[in-house]
Image (cartoon, grey):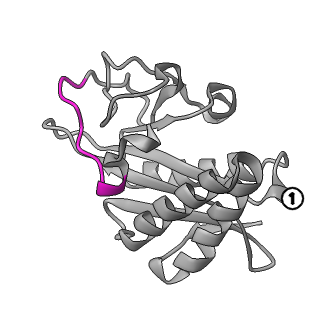
Amino acid sequence: MIYRAFHSSQQAEVVGLFSSVFAASEGEKEGAMLGHLTEQLSSLLDDESVLGFAAYEDETLVGAIFFSRLLFEAPVSVYMLSPVAVATEQQCQGVGQALIQFGLNALKERSVEVVITYGDPAYYSKVGFEPLSETVIQAPVKLSMPFGWQGQSLNGQPIPVMADRPTCVEPFKDPAYW
């Protein structure tokens, strides 16, 4: 398996992966919604506010993840991991966990302090995420299920308490994703 950053030139391939994976697991509507989200995120890839990483097997895309920057009034470097997709036939083989770990290591190299995500705690705890209270870091938009809000320090320090609600990239301002 090869893990590497991907670029906006691979947008169609990445969008296709997310659309097919989520359509198969959650239905056509969810597949279309995640396809649209990843199309927007792919168009924003800039090596600063939105980063994308992918897993390839024999040059075939089998997994992809996005990290987008959250901005606070305080000078702290926080990124959000979302979304994640692994090709249906590659699931439950550790591809997603390895890809997330690859992305987290890339963020550590950039001196990112904290990564947060919003998803299944049973899954994300396998790669070091822990439940996160919104009294510590608020989500950019009101959460529909607060138990899925999770964080991870990348610098060995406690996650800092942030008083303000962060600003996120434009696609995540849509409450449908929360």
- Describe residue 178's horizontal placement relative to residue 142 as left or right: right
Judged left or right of residue 172, residue 32 is: right
Q: Label 1 belongs to which residue?
A: 89
Residue 111 is at least partly visible in this image: no
Q: Quadrant of the N terminus?
A: bottom right
* 20, 113: nearer the viewer: 20
Residue at image position (59%, 31%) is: 128
Which of the 4 quarters of the picture holds residue 155?
A: top left
Q: Quadrant of the C terminus?
A: top left
Q: Report how many numbered discs are placed on residues in the image.
A: 1
- Return the x and y of residue 105 as percentages of the image width and height: 53, 51
Residue 86 vs residue 77: left or right?
Answer: right
Horizontal and vertical percent position of residue 119: 57, 34
- Report x, y in % for residue 68: 38, 53
**Bounds of the magenta segment:** 162-171
Amino acid type at image mark 1: Glu
